[in-house]
């Protein structure tokens, strides 16, 4: 584990406030709108079409292939756009994509999410197709929140398939154990508020899928979705062959993969992340101590996909803005790229 100096502005010292600020305030002030050069339709696992947008620079260090968290699309992900901006500035090609059942990918196919079981293979397939399109190797799999979970599965499949063109994975606040973290959310007032907000977004997603594919997604079923687990119980697990949501979450959670991975990994995680069970922190530390392929940055503060830095912290690191987590991720990629 690396121990680095990081501190947020004083009003964001609470992980809950930091998370709310990142999700509901900061997104309206994105300084770096995404301006892709080109768009692609990739073919993921089992031929599922996936929409992506790319930007290529001359003499690139490599290519970042990235996606976002549990809800949203390429149009509204300010954090992903900021990552792309600074990655391009540091000389990386960038490919961003809508993962299964999200954004433009949902318009191309009714295939639903699988929390990494197939999305990990999608990452690998996109990397292979990026190589054919002229994006510069090596390919780095990047994501945050649930997107970080997907990228970790991508690293697993890349290792299993011997895909040496994939350099590794770098993730911020990845979901590591769905069963424990969802149970934890239900135990606190703010946890229930966060789950309620996410559940409403998932129902909005399900209604959008119904409008696109009314013969596949029943409106009465969609209307009953009121929790994260309810979304997966109603729409996902039967299609994947699981008998319960708990079984599905146990199979798709990437924590058990981490000790087995030898492909380079970088994880940024905050001890005050209010979306994840705190008991995961010591387990993650133990795994990192036993796996030399894993670089873990664990901070006391940062919230969920926050890591906003104050001006003193920015001056210490020489960062051009407050997105401390993004700059540390890119530092690691630069070191790996040489």
Image: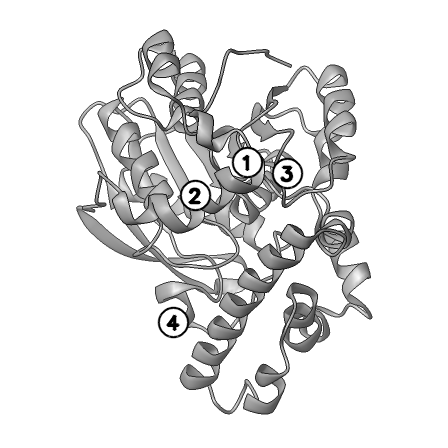
> Can you tell which mark lies on residue 80?
none
Q: N-terminal of the two: label 4 or label 3?
A: 4
Q: Would you say the residues marked 1 and 2 are in contact, meaning their CB atoms lie under 8 Å apart?
A: yes
> Can you tell which mark lies on residue 156?
3
C-alpha span from label 4 to label 3 = 26 Å
Q: N-terminal of the two: label 4 or label 1?
A: 4
Displayed quadrant of residue 105:
bottom left
Give the foreground label among 3 and 1: 1
Q: Secondary structure at mark 3?
A: helix
C-alpha span from label 3 to label 1 = 26 Å
302, 164: nearer the viewer = 302
Q: Which residue is mark 2?
A: 21
Q: N-terminal of the two: label 1 or label 2?
A: 2
| On screen, residue 29 above or below 326 | below
Label 3: few (<14), some or many (≥20) within 10 Å? Answer: many
C-alpha span from label 2 to label 3 = 33 Å
Give the foreground label among 2 and 3: 2
Q: Which residue is mark 1?
A: 303
> Can you tell which mark lies on residue 108?
4
Task: Point out the residue furthest to the top here.
Answer: 316
Q: Position of residue 117 (x, y in %)?
A: 64, 54
Residue at x-position 46% and y-position 57%: 99
Q: Would you say the residues marked 2 and 3 are in contact, meaning their CB atoms lie under 8 Å apart?
A: no
């Amino acid at each position: 584990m690396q121990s680095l100096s990081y501190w947020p502005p004083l009003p964001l010292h609470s992980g809950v406030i930091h998370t709310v600020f990142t999700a509901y305030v900061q997104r309206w002030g994105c300084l770096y709108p995404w301006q892709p050069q080109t768009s692609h339709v990739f073919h993921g696992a089992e031929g599922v079409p996936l929409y992506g947008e790319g930007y290529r620079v001359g003499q690139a260090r490599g290519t970042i292939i990235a996606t976002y968290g549990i809800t949203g699309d390429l149009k509204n992900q300010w954090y992903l756009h900021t990552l792309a901006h600074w990655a391009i500035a540091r000389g990386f090609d960038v490919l961003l994509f809508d993962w299964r059942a999200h954004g433009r990918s949902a318009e191309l196919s009714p295939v639903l999410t699988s929390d990494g079981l197939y999305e990990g293979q999608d990452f690998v397939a996109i990397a292979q197709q990026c190589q054919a399109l002229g994006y510069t190797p090596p390919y780095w799999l990047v994501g945050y929140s649930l997107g970080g979970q997907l990228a970790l599965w991508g690293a697993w499949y890349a290792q299993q398939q011997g895909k040496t063109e994939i350099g590794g994975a770098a993730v911020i606040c990845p979901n590591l154990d769905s069963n424990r973290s969802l149970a934890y959310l239900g135990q606190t007032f703010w946890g229930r508020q966060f789950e309620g907000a996410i559940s409403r977004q998932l129902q909005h997603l399900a209604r959008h899928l119904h409008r696109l594919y009314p013969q596949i997604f029943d409106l009465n079923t969609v209307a009953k979705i009121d929790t994260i687990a309810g979304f997966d119980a109603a729409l996902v697990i039967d299609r994947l062959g699981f008998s319960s949501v708990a079984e599905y979450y146990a199979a798709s959670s990437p924590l058990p993969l981490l000790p087995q991975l030898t492909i380079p990994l970088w994880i940024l995680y905050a001890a005050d992340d209010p979306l994840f069970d705190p008991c995961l922190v010591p387990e993650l530390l133990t795994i990192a101590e036993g796996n030399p392929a894993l670089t873990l940055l664990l901070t006391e503060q940062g919230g969920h996909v926050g890591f906003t830095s104050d001006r003193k912290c920015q001056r210490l690191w020489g960062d051009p803005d407050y997105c401390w987590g993004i700059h540390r991720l890119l530092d690691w990629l630069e070191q790996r790229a040489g």
